Amino acid sequence: MNYPLFSKENNSLAKKYLTKEVFETIKDKKTSLGYGLERLIHSGLNNDDSEIGVYAGDKESYSTFSLLISPIIESYHGFTTSSLHKSNMNPEDLDTPNPDKEGMYILSTRIRVGRNLENMPLGAAISKEERNRLEAMVVDALSLLEGELAGEYYALDGMSKDVQNRLIKDHFLFKEGDRFLEYAGLNRDWPKGRGIYHNINKTFLVWVNEEDQLRIISMQEGGDIKEVFTRLVTAIKRMESRLTFSYSEKLGYITSCPTNLGTAMRASVHIALPNLSNRMDKFTAITKQYHLQIRGIDGEHTQSKGHIFDISNARRLGVTEVQAVEEMYHGVVALIAAEKALD
Ligand code: ADP
Ligand code: ARG
């Protein structure tokens, strides 16, 4: 492999940290599965608007290519990869009273985690057979869920376009044809092996074999963050009685993209901020201070509509799950106060 020519417009962390020196040291390395540098950076090299630009093919990618990935992780999460990551999913420790009891600003709350199975390649390097086997294992674990969490699994293969589009529009299902995932090899054999589980009320959902093998999601209308968190944790614990998730002491839960390592948790609200949306300087000063990420109404890489934003914690590694949710909570409290002050 020759030294890759990232375009001038490319501002990804992959480009930034793949210096000639680093390249020379890692260019011929491969993980036991045969995952190499070319595949690791393929998405970032071919999508000039990448911010990160790498996708791991397996857990080993993080150690084999640490010379490139560790600075990316440190830059994104603000956490050194030599420290230990800590987990805390105890809902009793979560202090997040509803920041919007009158329901003036927050439309809905959603918390998701990414998970991948131990001893399986990640999506970028998984075979069709392994992916299908994994889907069956997940469906089997989901059959354990009872009560409010009980639901059904719907394979994407065979789902009508109408149903699929409705689920996407209503914010329940992943989109199709993401070009970042495409170049990472994560969309191979689509739609086979992919699907969604949800309970009757669609307050608990699991995406299977998209960017990560599992995205476990709890969501509902309004701003009761604790209820959303508690439901998520209950479901994860139940699923863990049958599935073992890939985890490392330093990196936490192993995910395809380094931005999701650690808690792999993104806690978000859909929130209407008409005043702040006309004061982007104020808006971004707050999101920066509270380590928040702003996304559009249809998720990542989409625009806000009707002054509604998706506000979530940006850091996922080096904070516990409770802290990640509380980071989002404190930021949202500050945003609502600033919005009110502009009335
Ligand atoms: P992820 O959250 O898995 O990183 P996306 O940013 O693409 O992926 O979001 C997935 C879907 O979840 C999108 O349809 C998005 O609008 C929806 N979503 C995110 N946060 C909320 C929320 N608080 N309320 C309702 N829908 C949400
Ligand atoms: N690969 C994309 C980039 O570098 C997305 C990174 C974060 N998002 C994600 N879904 N993993 O910008």
Image: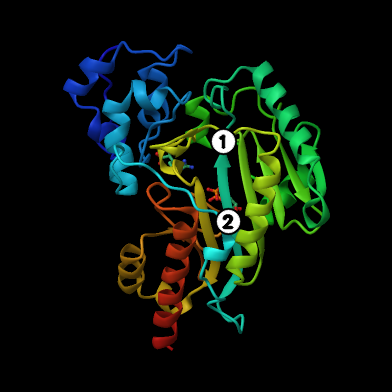
Q: How is the image coloured?
A: rainbow
The image quadrant of residue 103 is bottom right
**Quadrant of the image containing the N terminus:** top left
Q: Amino acid at mark 2?
A: Ile
* Residue 41 visible in the displayed image: no
Q: Name the element at disc 2.
A: strand
Q: Amino acid at mark 1?
A: Asp
State the residue position of label 1. Answer: 212
Tell me if residue 306 comes above or below residue 118 in the rendering. below
| Crowding near the residue tagged with mark 1, few <14, some 14–19, many ≥20 C-alpha atoms within 10 Å | many
Mark 2 and mark 1 lie on one chain; the one further toward the N terminus is 2
Q: Name the element at disc 1.
A: loop
| Residue at the spot 79% in from the left edge and 42% down from the top edge | 144
- Mark 2 lies within 8 Å of ligand 1 (Cβ measured): no
Q: Taking the image as four quarters, which one is ligand 2 found in?
A: top left
* Residue 44 visible in the displayed image: yes
| Residue at the spot 50% in from the left edge and 45% down from the top edge | 264
Image coordinates for residue 333, horizontal then vertical, percent: 45, 76
Q: Which residue is the extreme one toward the left?
A: 21
- Image side of residue 95 versus residue 135, left or right: left
Residue 111, labelled with which disc?
Answer: 2
Image coordinates for residue 22, horizontal then vertical, percent: 21, 23
